[in-house]
Image (cartoon, rainbow, N blue to C red):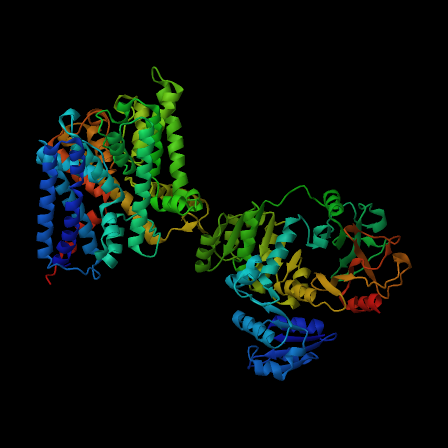
Amino acid sequence: MTSPFITSALGIILLVFGGIVLLPIGVAAIEGDYRSALPFLAASAFSFALGLLCRWHGRFCKNFDSMRHNEGLLIVTLTWIVTAAIGAIPYLFFGLSPVDAYFESVSGFTTTGATILTDFSLYPRPFFFWRSLTQWLGGMGIIVLFVAILPQFGVAGRRIFFAEAPGPTEDKLTPRITHTAKALWLIYLLLTVLEVLCLVIAGMPLFDAVCNSFSTMAAGGFSPHPLSIMGYQSSAVTWITTLFMVLAGTNFALQYKCFIKGKAKPLITNDEFRFYLTIIAATSLLLAYFLFRMPGGTVSASLRDSMFQVSSIITTTGFASADFALWTVPAQAVLFAVMLTGSCAGSAGGGVKVVRVLFVARFLIREIDQIVHPRAILPIKIDRVTIQEDIQRQMLSFLLFYLVLLLVSGFAVTMIEQNAAVGFVGTAATIGNIGPGFGEIGPMGSFGNLHLATKVIFTIDMIVGRLELIPFLAMLSPEFWSFTRN
Amino acid sequence: MDILIYGTTEFSYLVAARLHQQHNITILHDSGELSDKFGNLDVSIVEGSGGDIAVLEKIEAEKSDLFIACSTIDEANIVACWTIKKIADTETICFIAKAALYKNFSSITHNQYQTRYDIDSIIWPEQLLTQDIFRIISVPEALDVEFLAGGKAKLFEYRIKENSTIVDKTIKDCHFPKNVLIPGITRDGKLFIPNGATTIRLHDKVVFIGTSMALDTLAADFFKHDRKVKTVSIIGGGSVGFMLAEKLERTGIKVKLIEQSPQRCAFLADSLKKTLVLQGNGTDLELLESEAIAAADACICTTDNDEKNLLCSLLIKQLGSRRIVTRVGNIQNYELFEHVGIDVVVSPKASALTEVLNRIQAQKVDVIALIEGGKGEVLRLTLPDTFQEIRIKNMQLPVNAIIGVIIRGHKVIIPNGENSLQARDRLKIFSMKEDSEKIKEFFFA
């Protein structure tokens, strides 16, 4: 592993990111709130400075074609850690402590949507715009963005592209990775614009519509409204957001084929997508039943809230159309179950991913069949294709690691907070990049009152969860860090 | 008719043996040992490559009416067919045994390719066999099933079992439905053409020919037709086993398939959707018992090894299977298989031979089905315009044969002696193999 290589690549990313941080200044200008522009100028300046420093250390290296696998993993991880740090700089100016600012920033970039804010009225609009923008950038993936807009990465782009989203399936839309990255951002952008239009037509103010759309399509969950989607008190807004959340949790490569290329078949016949819709439909009906049984439940409201909430949690968005922390225990149990499922692979959402759940289900059914027919050859198929042994092993070990991490982090937080609900639901909500949990960290609550150590653990959980564990696990090996200086 | 055959496979011998007395046959073969049995045939044998224009010109290939490429190598067959097309417009038949290549040629759209493939017909014996087996097992209890006149008329073959109501009755006392004929009966391995006074005996194999509806009534009234085929076991996962399983699972039948090679098993399990693929030996009694192979509505032994097929079939029969279809590779083993009590014996070569005979349109007569491993044939012919109308009972056929179906315009007639034949009628005639030439002479003399 060569450090100049890594710093040089990181340098390029930081230089471009320094430009992106300037975007909220536009909002500040429209609002005439010039004082709010300062934090973003500072962050941008810092990003440029650090970027140049990295470039200098990396001897302005421009050719990354010989990048190795480990270097790719490290660049991806560092990109996420460092951009989140730069993204936290503006928050410092608005009075957040360093840990809180970093937590909020990581929560944004990883599209978690867990917030430490308690009083929303203290902050100006550019602040909320930046929160939503970080989610939007993180939703499709920062690396995907850089691969799309920076031609420098070339061959190495392929490496870091798949290192960022190491899902079990490699869907490349086009032979060249830059074109794939552009295609993904195109469909992402179009859906976002469409949602803004729908929300504005439904009567939401433009600024809120933009911010909420950014958070929805990224499966993020930051809303400029302190009461989340519930605050708009509109059925139309709730239904529109539900639809776009479901889309945000669907594989974007397949959506590109469906909406841009007009080939609906790959999407409709996709096993994962069908299973995803089935889970949403089944759990929504179950949840609607529990909600209807609660005092004052009506059919339309229970259906609307259950559909919205299940979509919000399964896609790992984390919006709330009602304070589900106040719901009955069976209703919360349903939500916790979908919390562990997550969205489709290749979508903006996080979590375990539906395809892995589907695989485990078929794996278990296979084991039962094998007992009945000991001599039978029973492949596990997804999308009518047999899953190879090594991919099977990867998926099973992923699940095992996910579980181990969930338990370790859950126990640690439980001990720190002396509260098992915060420990385990909070861990599930942060590793899965969902956002709000139950109880005091519920949708109307805040992570702000938690212990400092808890915030640090949750911050790590969010990054590790967003990168799907693998880069993180690789870094635990001492062999990974064998640098050579040349 | 001049026929040029490329390749010295078992199949080219079979075609040559069947046709060498009526047609002029030349066999072209690549250098190497030639089996002795070709010496017994009245054919000319030339050494050389089918893809070599010089060789083809030397043997005056352009004068031949039909070119059959049936060497062991698919690509060589294709090239040979293309080469002969360069020098003459000869009809070509090409043998292919690879699924990917076969699909190229057989697909309906292949005429829309940028340039045409330019081969007249493609034969894949295994694929024909698959169709034959599929057709047979789709009719419960039947030993053979053929579709005539696009399915408007059918041919079924049944074995007469102990509890049958027609044992020891003469045919005219049996009260079969209208529009059903019995053109042939096999008793003790011998096929003969019966008349109304013939008595049906236990274990006879009786061929019925008739309209589609009448045969269905017959099947329901005289043979158990109440149980549909729901489960099928297949031993051997080669091309036939694979294609058959694919076809069966598409019609909703539950299939269990036993294959020995682990690699092939992996391929089968990957490619088939619902079939249960079992890795093991088809002669492993324990496996057959634990997976209840014999309990299926039909068992099909289709490995590429005759000995294994035989042993498998006997084991499964012993375990109580109701219906066994067994593939035989070497035609000479056909009778042995029948003799030891296997109900349905099928062969890819017989299937391919029917197909080839079908294409040899000498004097507007062709063979559309072989019965009992080739002992009987169903001929198809169209009466010439000059044909004088005549009642069947007044017609003096030189040999014993049965006119099974008359197709007149869109009408399908199952004739009796009172019906008459007219010019341009299309006939399906059941006859013994050795008599087919005389029938042709009679109608076209």
Residue at the spot 64% in from the left edge and 60% down from the top edge: B346
Residue A362 shows up from this direction: no
Residue B90, image x, y percentages: 65, 73
Camera-nearest residue between A172 and B182: A172
> As displayed, is residue A76 above or below residue A341?
below
Residue A443, image x, y percentages: 24, 27
* Quarter location, residue A419: top left
Quarter of the figure with the C terminus of chain B: bottom right
Residue A128 shows up from this direction: yes
Camera-nearest residue between A288 and B114: B114
* Quarter location, residue B335: bottom right
Camera-nearest residue between A110 and B250: A110
Left or right of A182? Residue B217 is right
Left or right of B54? Residue A202 is left
> As displayed, is residue A25 above or below residue B82?
above
Residue A320, image x, y percentages: 28, 27
> As displayed, is residue A255 above or below residue A334?
below
Residue at the spot 69% in from the left edge and 78% down from the top edge: B41
Residue B32, image x, y percentages: 55, 81
Total residue callouts: 0
Quarter of the figure with the N terminus of chain B: bottom right
Camera-nearest residue between A30 and A481: A30
Point out the residue furthest to the right here.
B394
Left or right of A74? Residue A286 is right
